[in-house]
Image (tube, rainbow, N blue to C red):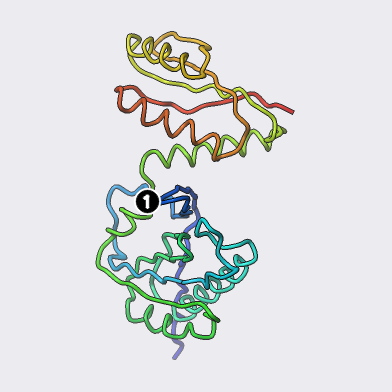
């Protein structure tokens, strides 16, 4: 009799994105996540959350903002590779849906069907851990992913900013040179007229206002922190006034 070989489980999805934010006094968090899972209106299956928390020794290996130094990333990648390999070998039915790096830690966020298989795989991580401290935290449901990993609307704007910057650089733009970013706001014309005057008094210049669409320009280098410091504020500013911030574009600058 021939036994059918158990099919391997796909632990990591195909579509991922990343965003970041600051908190406290100069601390920074970087979050990468499964885009398809974040966009779901309703999650199906994988109703048990398990986080594998890696604590990095602080001295010489973590910067003041809480993120690892550059030389630490290969160690974290080796740990992740070993963890995923162990889960795949066990065919533990689970999905990696997020990575959170902050405060001298990296958290791997999984949604799990095969809880027993996951725990058995995770119990064999000592050889991979080196001098990392490893902790598992568990809870039912998708609450942690939805509240702590999945981006708030303003961070989708940051992700969009990254895509536009990549597109400009791929087209030949020099990110160190100043670009005129053309910010687009959509809404009723009375509100847009007031916004035009307000932004005009705060370093923006009018490019056009017609058919419910206001375009305001402002100079910036193609640095995500610089760009998002403006687009994030515009996103909230427009939301509070009942209009929509619709992103930005720029010409290639070489």
Percent position of residue 104, x then y: 48, 65
Residue 234 left/right relative to 207: left
Q: Residue at x 74, y 28 (%)?
A: 254
Percent from the top left, x then y, of residue 136?
37, 75
- Secondary structure beneath dot 1 equals loop
- Residue at image point 35% right, 17% down: 187
Where is residue 116? Give x, y as percent: 33, 81
State the quadrant of the N terminus.
bottom left
Image x and y of residue 86, in percent: 49, 79
Q: Is residue 186 left or right of residue 226?
A: left
Question: Considering depth in this image, is 72 or 109 the residue closer to the camera?
Answer: 72
Give the residue at x 25% y 63%.
141
Query: From the viewer's perspective, is residue 50 above or below residue 253?
Result: below
Pointer 1 residue? 150
* Side (left or right) of 145 relative to 229: left
Name the residue rendered at 36%, 44% in the picture.
152
Q: Using a 10 Å C-alpha cutoff, classify the residue at mark 1 as few (fewer than 14 neighbours), some (14 to 19) or many (20 or more).
A: many
């Amino acid at each position: 009799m021939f036994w059918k070989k158990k099919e391997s489980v796909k632990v990591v999805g195909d579509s991922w994105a990343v965003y970041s934010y600051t908190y406290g006094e100069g601390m920074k968090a970087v979050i990468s996540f499964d885009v398809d899972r974040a966009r779901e209106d309703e999650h199906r299956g994988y109703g048990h959350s398990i986080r594998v928390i890696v604590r990095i020794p602080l001295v010489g290996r973590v910067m003041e903002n809480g993120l690892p130094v550059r030389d630490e990333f290969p160690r974290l990648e080796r740990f992740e590779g070993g963890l995923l390999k162990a889960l795949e070998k066990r065919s533990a039915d689970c999905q990696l849906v997020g990575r959170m790096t902050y405060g001298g830690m990296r958290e791997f966020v999984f949604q799990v069907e095969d809880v027993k298989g996951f725990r058995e795989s995770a119990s064999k991580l000592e050889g991979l851990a080196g001098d990392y401290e490893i902790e598992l935290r568990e809870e039912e449901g998708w609450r942690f992913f939805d509240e702590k990993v999945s981006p708030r609307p303003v961070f989708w704007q940051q992700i969009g900013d990254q895509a536009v910057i990549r597109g400009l650089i791929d087209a030949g733009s020099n990110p160190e040179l100043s670009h005129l970013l053309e910010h687009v706001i959509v809404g009723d014309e009375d509100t847009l007229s007031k916004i035009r005057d307000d932004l005009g008094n705060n370093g923006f210049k009018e490019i056009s206002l017609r058919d419910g669409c206001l375009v305001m320009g402002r100079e910036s280098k193609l640095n995500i922190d610089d760009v998002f410091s403006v687009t994030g504020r515009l996103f909230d500013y427009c939301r509070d006034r009942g209009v929509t911030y619709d992103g930005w574009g720029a010409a290639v600058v070489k």
